[in-house]
Amino acid sequence: NNSSSFPSNFFFGTSSSAYQYEGAYLADGKGLNNWDVYSHKPGNLIVDGSNADIAVDHYHRYLEDIDLMHSLGVNSYRFSISWARILPKGRFGEINEAGIKFYNNLIDGLLLKGIEPFITLTHIDFPQELEDRYGSWLSPESQEDFAYYADICFKSFGDRVKYWVTFNEPSFQVKLGYQAGTFPPSRCSKPFGNCTYGDSEKEPFIAAHNIILAHIAAVHIYRTKYQATQGGSLGIVLHCFWYEPISNSVADKLAAERAQSFSINWYIPFTILFFIFYTNKAKMQDILGSILPEFSKTEKQKLNKGLDFIGINHYTSFYVRNCMLTTCGPGKGTSKTEGYWTQSSQKNGIDIGEPTELAGMNVYPQGMEKIVTYLKDRYHNVPMIITENGYGDMNKPNSTTESLLHDVERIKYLAGYLDALSTAIKKGADVRGYFVWSLLDNFEWNDGYTIRFGLHHVDYKTLRRTPKSSATWYRNFISQHIVKD
Ligand code: FCB
């Protein structure tokens, strides 16, 4: 398909994260992180009782994985650093040199093959030592730890790494960790979930506030200590569904806008342009009342130039309806703190896009064009990178390797979404790259190993990697669209 067009310096890559890939959870001085501990806790919500102690053993097989990327012809790779592998005890202990060495080897290996590294500093994992000390993102201490850790990463890797992401999907992280309680630290209150501790109406916002400030602190360090010599770019990766108002009514349109605000808009204005921050904050304040924490004067001063690009993780779309406490209050929809709204994959019994085996994962390629255009219009065409997009297969008891390798549905999905992306680009959106989630099948959080997102199949007994049809498809797509220097 040559009808789509991408800029000549466009990044085509694949995406991954440390906990989902590396394994080697106790190797070479690594400390435990929150997921290491959670996945070993009886009664956790991981459906197949698995963990990522081994995962796909990327820690030991990274050279083989770089070869796979090389044969795909990608020019970039997004991965995350395991914080506890670099700083097992956060800022209260030593740097683990073996951890630094691993990422140096990975970065050098990528560069040798002409693959640009994109690093996410933390992709959901958090050192357990710090969780135990002060309760992770609920404490402002987390900001100091994150900034300290970011500084070490910039200093150690920034001579070669030019693209940095501070956080992956903060909205999802705080929702699952502190509202629904389905991710560690498993905090929530009824009726949102069933946890021992927590306050679902308040804690997600406190955690998000600390995450935003941690982002700002890390960026500030980069700008003042490294920008001039390293010249890199920094961004934050946001969880971006497309939220389609279910009707043309003003109430439903506003509800969709609120839904968008709590996953996206809350995180961007703080970091990009001061004045948007204020207009947006006024609206959020209406909804949140006194819950939304204030920023101090010095914090506000650091807000400018808080990011160079927005990372977009986009998979699917939902209809959004405005509603009342009685029809979709806590337990039925969202909280008072988000100004009631509810999402669904259907309107009058008809699905948005094509439904898939995975509930809430309908294929609606137009969503890609819509979300990119929404962000372009709202944020003055800030540079954007599609940091994740991909298709998951259920690992059914009767699914054979053969059927998993012949992944026509994934190809259809990727082709559709890339085409929609190229339309948005043609219409003027400044999108710089696209990363498929994921290079390999891997550990899918609470879904364990039951859902496969890879362009390569992984046999979890032997850890053998085999290209699926989609790998061949992606290779051909890239070779037709990439312009080599
Ligand atoms: C995203 C996560 C990523 C992976 C994909 C399928 O929300 O960032 O780690 O789990 O979903």
Image: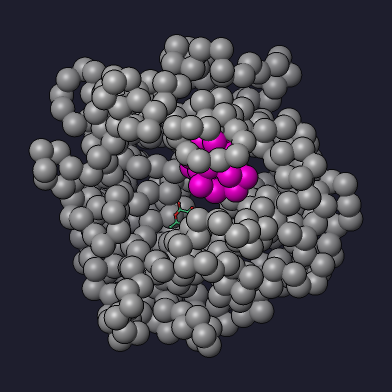
Residue 186 visible, this angle: yes
**Quadrant hosting residue 173:** top right
Tell me: residue 82, above or below residue 166: below
**What is the x, y in percent for residue 460?**
50, 80
Tell me if 61 is positioned left or right of 407 in this view.
Answer: right
**What is the x, y in percent for residue 373?**
31, 37
Looking at the image, which is closer to me, 301 or 398? 398
Tell me: residue 343, above or below residue 449: above
Residue 83 visible, this angle: no
The number of discs equals: 0
Residue located 44% across and 16% down the image = 287
* 465 magenta-colored: no
* Quadrant location, the N terminus: bottom left
**What is the x, y in percent for residue 416?**
23, 58
Residue located 24% across and 73% down the image = 408
Looking at the image, which is closer to me, 319 or 377? 319
The residue stretch that appears in magenta: 170-188
Tell me: residue 416, above or below residue 479: above
Residue located 15% across and 27% down the image = 247
Tell me if 344 is positioned left or right of 284 in this view.
Answer: left
